[in-house]
Amino acid sequence: MTDHLSGLRRTYTLASLDETEVDPSPFRQFEQWLAQIREQTNHVEANAMTLATVGGDGHPSARIVLLKGFDERGLVFFSHYDSLKGTEIAAHPEVATVFYWAALERQVRVRGIASRIGEAESDAYFASRPTGSQIGATASPQSAVVENREWLERRFSALEDQAARGEPVPRPEHWGGYRIVPWEFESWQGRPNRLHDRVRYRLVGNSWDIARLAP
């Protein structure tokens, strides 16, 4: 059934990546690449990343989330604390993320430790969201089994009526941000003949060690 997949391949020719030329800071290197994918391709969700977590049972899981901020303290995303990802982070805060930007033949991998950000920071971001997004986050018990779609829509409609009356939608206690504090970055640039460029940053003490990895 999958014979047609074996022939799917492409040759990567757009750019190269040299360990002697990358920025000494993985955060600045990441910022440069993120800016390039947004500017050169108008990539609307260039901040989409695959987030991988491991639960208390040792089973891994992964999903797409959106990066909503980053600086040298780490990468920030938002979610329900009681969701699958939230309970898995509570059990094992070690996480991994992948950004894949096919248009520039690049990916960035990050490994680090995730923890909740402060309530004030979560409050500020929640207040900046569109009302519909606020209501959706409040109405949905993310990852829980629900009766049907209509059950969710009734909860949404009730909160929508509340908002229409001018009543604010407060941030739910079970919803907020996480910050991933990285200890490893890997920048990957596709190259011809599968001799891809891979440059790894690894935190050693208070500085970043830079090394080239075999593709």
Image (tube, rainbow, N blue to C red):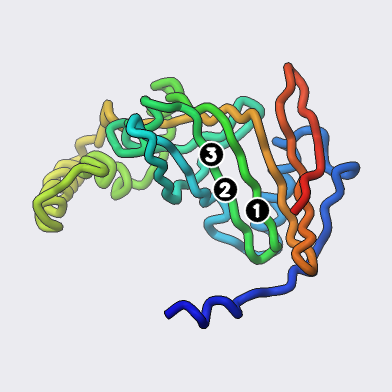
The span from disc 3 to disc 1 (Cα, nearest Å) is 13 Å
SS for tag 3?
strand
Q: Amino acid at mark 1?
A: Gln
Q: Amino acid at mark 3?
A: Ala
Q: Is residue 126 visible?
A: no
Image coords of residue 96 (percent x, y): 53, 39
Residue at 54% from the left image edge and 59% from the top image edge: 44
Residue that numbered label 1 is attached to: 107
The span from disc 2 to disc 3 (Cα, nearest Å) is 7 Å
Residue at 28% from the left image edge and 42% from the top image edge: 137
Left or right of 178, for residue 151: left
How busy is the neighbourhood of tag 2: few (under 14 within 10 Å), some, or many (20 plus)? Answer: some
Q: With respect to residue 189, does 187 lie above or below?
A: above
Q: With respect to residue 158, does 148 lie above or below?
A: below
User: How many labels sit on residues?
Assistant: 3
Label 2–label 1 contact, CB within 8 A: yes
Label 2–label 3 contact, CB within 8 A: yes
Residue at 31% from the left image edge and 39% from the top image edge: 84
The span from disc 2 to disc 1 (Cα, nearest Å) is 7 Å
SS for tag 2?
strand
Q: Amino acid at mark 2?
A: Val
Left or right of 30, for residue 65: left
Q: Which disc, if any, is residue 11?
A: none
Residue that numbered label 2 is attached to: 98
Q: With respect to residue 148, does 76 lie above or below?
A: above
SS for tag 1?
strand
- Of the two numbered discs 3 and 1 on the same chain, state the one appearing first in sequence: 3
Residue that numbered label 3 is attached to: 96
Image quarter for residue 112? top right
